[in-house]
Image (spheres, coloured by chain):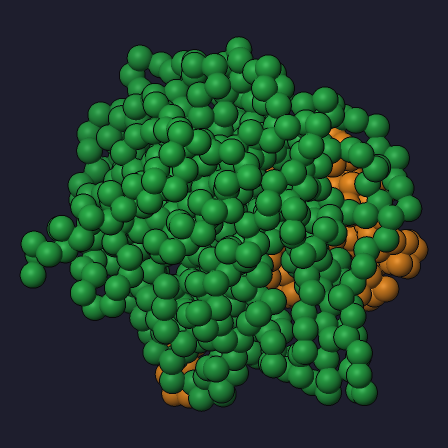
Chain colours: A orange, B green
Amino acid sequence: MLRILYQTLRTGTVTEKMLPEADKEIEIVGNALKEEVHKRFHHSLTIREIDAGSCNGCELEIHAMNNPYYDCERFGVHFTASPRFADVLFVTGPVSRNMEIALKRTVDAAPDPKIVVAVGDCAACGGAFGTSYASLGAVENVVPVDVKVPGCPPSPAALIRALLEAVGRS
Amino acid sequence: MVAPHFKQVLVEKVLVEQVLAEQFGDLLRTSDASRDGVLILSLPADEIHEAARILKKSGGRLSAEWATDDTPFGRELALWTAFAVPNVPDSGPDAGPDTKIDRFILIRSDVPLSNPAFPTLTGHFAAAYRFERIILSFFGIDSIGHPDRRPWIRHEDWPDGFFPLRKDAPIDAPFVRSNGSYEWIRGEGEGVYEIPVGPVHAGIIEPGHFRFQAVGETILNLEERLGYVHKGIEKRFESLPWTEGARLAGRISGDSTVAHALAWCRAVEDMAGLLVPPRGVWLRALFLERERIANHLGDIGAIANDAAFAFLLAQLSRLREDVLRLNKRLFGHRLLMDMIVPGGAAADLDAKGIEAIRTEMDRLSAEFERLVVIYDENPSLQDRVATTGVVTKKTAADLGLVGFAARASGISSDRRVRFPFPPYDELKVSEAIRHSGDVNDRVWVRIEEVRESIRLIREILARLPGGSALPSDGLSIRPQPGRTGLGIVEGWRGEIVTWVQAGPSGKVSRVMVRDPSQVNWLGLERAVLGNIVPDFPLCNKSFNQSYSGHDM
Ligand code: SF4
């Protein structure tokens, strides 16, 4: 237990501190985001992530939004297990044929109004996989999309920026 | 003591080939494309299961099994099998580490279009179970005697008679869903109930379906059903020029982008006879080890988190983020995508960069060691991870598991050691092996591998050759028609096997990729038996398999 305490004290708060270039931006964008979330979503914005066929690269960066550097919960943003609670849907990947139905059902299960964000080049335009018997390409080929975030994969900072854009539009 | 080992190698080397030659006589042919460490044979399809028996007896493992449609060459279909065979059978303490090197034996068998079938290998190798379901699903080639003829990766609503990897199936073939249904394995009896989970899971993870039969909290059976993220990658390779394949290979499984791009490039270089300049070879290893560290850090944290110990997740994901940020700063991409290209590496490193990585390794090593002590000394965490999700050595060997999952069950499997691709032939990796096969040992193998990767990175930086990371006179990939190439890489999950084949005009004809998850998913089904349902996430995370790499 003492070791844990020491480690915690030794680490201190890393959020927004260590590498200034990226973090200053996170702070500015994050605070703007926090304001929007407070105003429009009663202090709490909930995201449901749906992998519709991704290579998992986008998931890694979405995960990183929760690491201590970005810690997106401090802006009132958190991820939910159920689409029923979701304000925002993060959809990744080209939509695979085998996920088409599950994607539609999950999007349908989220209450209106909902914001669908196509995360990554694949979701935004089909990316490296294109369209084929197995891949339907961009997410908008299957469900309506509100915001597209380019990048392969988009960085956590880009994702937080995109969230600001998404809630600003709602 | 050295001399007898030496002899044993020679005897054994003669043995496998001799036994095969004696058994099959004229039926067995050796390809002139065989080379050091890779023997390419051909044998009638009817004999392949007998060859499999012989290879198994000499300690071989079925590493991959796939089909090709050779109609562009004026032939018909073909079955390929790849066996990893130890030069010396694992014979207890006497087998010295230097002799623990594998060879690959590839066997090609013609399969007629009029009767597309061959006798199953499932009687000898459990891994064939899913390989052959994939061959049936994508080529319509039947494996006679296979206990399970359900489709795999192909879902039940795909159009009948549509076999995407056949040459007469266009990549954008119209897709009309049919009304198929999938026969699940059922459990019956008093108190037995079923829990279906997925494809969309509760977290930020890839999709797949799991079906548990349980009594009370205890898992009686787990049936996986995957294929949800099948994107037609193997077919897509066939429509791309050789120069663009590395980019796609780097997106087979985003967490293994370096490893997959490397396996693909090594296969293409093998096929086309390309040489990589020494600096390119060593930089590739640097990227591969950085990828290993980043994934191990993130996963050890995530495993602890699944046992409700969020502290380690926070700490380790911080360390992971540091590695990714330095990647971005030095090489331009956090996950190192597109750094590995045919002929070498697309990014280089100057003296300042080398210094930055050295400093990073010092800091990482110190911080990591403190966290390891915390992991090891936390009783409530140990209570969850020790003796949970056990895969015994026998089960691991029977299933042919690869990577850290095999090593946690006492099986030597590190391709950096057992089939050392350059520069690992000079780096001398020390292989991490543990023996209890539980969640804890899967974590410990990864802890030891982080340490070893830190050591390797320091050594790579110290020995980094000068010159260019890419061939100075440019690159052209012009393989002979029909030429094949094999790339074997130990990614952070384990052995990746990539095989490429040039068509009659020298363009891509077939690319086969065997991600470690294609065999290791079988291990998870076994690991959870007898465990309680709430420990499933923990077991699952301790393997952290790729769905995308499996589904392709
Ligand atoms: S955008 Fe890139 S990282 Fe994201 S799913 Fe597509 S290939 Fe993977």
Confirm whether residue B126 shows in the render.
yes
Q: Quadrant of residue B420?
A: top left
In this picture, residue B336 sits left or right of residue B552: left
Q: Would residue A108 appear left or right of A32 to someone viewing this image? A: right
At a point 83% along the width and 65% down the height, the residue shown is: A85
Residue at 67% in and 79% down: B219
- Asked whether A157 or B286 is in front, the reply is B286
Apparent side of residue B3 relative to residue B321 in the rendered image (left or right): left
> What residue is at 67 percent from the left and 34 percent from the top?
B116
Q: Position of residue A4 (x, y in %)?
A: 42, 81
Task: Give coordinates of residue B174: x percent, y percent.
Answer: 84, 28
Q: Nearer the viewer, residue B316 or B131?
A: B131
Task: Classify residue B327 by image quadrant.
Answer: top left
Residue B364 is situated, as x and y percent measured from the top left of the image, at 33, 61
Q: Quadrant of the C terminus of chain B?
A: top right
Residue at the location (68% across, 41% down)? B142
| Image coordinates for residue B450, horizontal then vertical, percent | 34, 60
Q: Is residue A68 above or below residue B160?
A: below
Vertical placement of B502 versus A105: above or below? Answer: above
Determine whether, in the image, residue B349 is placed left or right of residue B27.
Answer: left
Q: Quadrant of the N terminus of chain B?
A: bottom left
| Above or below for B126 versus A98 | below
